[in-house]
């Protein structure tokens, strides 16, 4: 019943948006029209950790004030989780009244900044038409990609398309990797930081030359020139709030170290078995995602050297009391982790994975020692 009601509400919103957009398509902007990029600040929920980007079109003479937003999706999409994981779920552009948009961010206590585009009226009209047409064409839908295709990159694309040149390019932090750029966004969200550190592969270790985050676009727009003048006029702060720092008794570094320390110190077979099973399952998940998902960020994940599926074989031979292969595969797993350490020694997530690396080494070393063939001493 609840799902049916949500679907009806969603269909109504789309219908109203289509009606509103039909009106928008017939509008000729006046000389007093303004088009601006809205940058919404970060929040404390997982979906809001990176902020948001949208485009505002306002024209008092046409009684128009609308926000175009590339971040919409339908929670009722069949197999939502699997589609999102695979990377073939459709996101779409939607429009909304500016007053409703700003009220939502005011309610969520998230900052909103505005940068008005200083472009001629004919280009404002062209951009407005491109946005309106996108709502009623195949361009309305796109497949979300964390770095390459998101609410921010789509805004960059539509503006560059309108200006018929690649005006908007990244101007800051191009000497940092995507992983390094992302890391501070997870401050005070420890397990989210840990999760993304271990699930992302080599793509996020590339230099961050693309604009993919809202605050990156905001910084770059301040520095970009178009036709020998700044592309954007003076920045405006529409709403701003004092940053609330979240606190959690469990989502922090201390519970993480405490749990791993407990595993090391307790030294019980059942606990070690459960721990190694968890590590191996995560490794299997990373391998699966690398082949299954279209998200390139999940491919070529060298963290499988730490979360090693070979540990399943260690557990099998351990449970069947095969000391020879338990020892050999334990040593192999240890050697692979040594390789892993030297591979990530310069990576930003070294410190956050080090406690797991130490725990793995301790558990597998004592397992190897227990199953090493003893050489008899002849007197």
Image: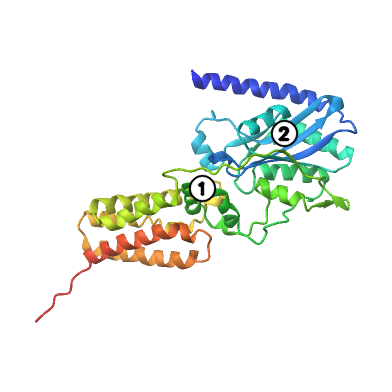
Q: Quadrant of residue 91?
A: top right
Q: Is residue 7 visible?
A: yes
Q: Of the residues tagged 1 and 2, which is closer to the observer?
A: 1
Residue 68, horizontal then vertical, whole percent: 72, 34
| Front position in the image: 222 or 1 | 222
Q: Which residue reaches farthest front?
A: 242
Residue 220: x and y in percent read: 74, 52
Residue 350 falls left or right of residue 112: left
Nearer-the-camera pick, 331 or 346:
346
Q: Identify the mark at residue 188; answer none if there is no mark.
A: 1
Expressed as whole percent of the image width and height from the top left, the position of residue 375 reads 17, 74
**To which quarter of the image does residue 369 belong?**
bottom left
Say if mark 1 contacts mark 2, CB within 8 Å.
no
Task: Name the residue: 48% across, 43% down.
Answer: 247
Judge whether residue 136 can be spotted in this image: no
Q: Mark 1 or mark 2: which comes first in sequence?
A: 2
The secondary structure type at the circle numbered 1 is loop
Residue 222 against residue 53 in the figure, above or below: below
Residue 80, placed above or below residue 198: above
> Quarter of the image holding residue 332?
bottom left
Q: CA distance from mark 1 to mark 2?
A: 31 Å
* Residue occupied by mark 2: 68
Q: Residue at x 57, y 59 (%)?
A: 205
The way the protein has been coloured in the rendering is rainbow
Taking the spot 26% from the left edge, 55% from the top edge, the residue there is 266
User: Callout 2: helix, strand or loop?
Assistant: strand
Residue furthest to the bottom in view is 379
Q: Which mark is residue 283?
A: none
């Amino acid at each position: 019943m609840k799902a049916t009601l949500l679907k009806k509400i969603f269909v109504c919103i789309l219908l109203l948006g289509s009606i509103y957009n039909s009106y928008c398509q017939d509008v000729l902007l006046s000389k007093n029209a303004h088009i601006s990029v809205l940058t919404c600040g970060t929040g404390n929920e997982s979906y809001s950790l990176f902020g948001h980007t949208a485009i505002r079109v306002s024209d008092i003479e046409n009684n128009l004030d609308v926000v175009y937003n590339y971040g919409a999706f339908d929670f009722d999409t069949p197999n939502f989780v699997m589609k999102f994981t695979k990377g073939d779920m459709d996101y779409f552009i939607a429009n909304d009244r500016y007053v409703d948009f700003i009220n939502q961010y005011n309610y969520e206590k998230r900052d909103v900044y505005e940068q008005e585009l200083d472009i001629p009226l004919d280009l404002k009209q062209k951009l407005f038409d491109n946005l309106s047409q996108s709502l009623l064409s195949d361009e309305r839908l796109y497949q979300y990609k964390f770095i390459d295709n998101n609410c921010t990159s789509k805004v960059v694309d539509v503006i560059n398309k309108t200006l018929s040149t690649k005006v908007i390019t990244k101007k800051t932090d191009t000497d940092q990797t995507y992983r390094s750029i992302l890391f501070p966004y997870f401050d005070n969200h420890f397990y989210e930081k840990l999760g993304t550190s271990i699930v992302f592969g080599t793509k996020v270790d590339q230099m961050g030359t693309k604009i993919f985050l809202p605050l990156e676009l905001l910084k770059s727009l301040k520095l970009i020139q178009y036709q020998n003048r700044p592309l954007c006029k003076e920045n405006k702060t529409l709403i701003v709030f004092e940053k609330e720092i979240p606190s959690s008794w469990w989502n922090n570094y201390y519970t993480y170290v405490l749990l791993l320390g407990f595993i090391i110190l307790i030294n019980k077979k059942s606990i070690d078995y459960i721990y190694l099973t968890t590590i191996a399952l995560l490794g299997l998940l990373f391998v699966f995602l690398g082949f299954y998902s279209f998200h390139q960020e999940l491919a070529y994940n060298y963290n499988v050297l730490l979360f090693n599926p070979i540990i399943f074989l260690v557990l099998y031979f351990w449970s069947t009391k095969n000391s020879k292969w338990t020892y050999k595969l334990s040593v192999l797993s240890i050697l692979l982790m040594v390789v892993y350490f030297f591979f990530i020694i310069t990576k930003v997530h070294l410190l956050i994975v080090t406690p797991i690396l130490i725990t793995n080494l301790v558990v597998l070393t004592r397992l190897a020692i227990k199953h090493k063939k003893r050489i008899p001493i002849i007197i």
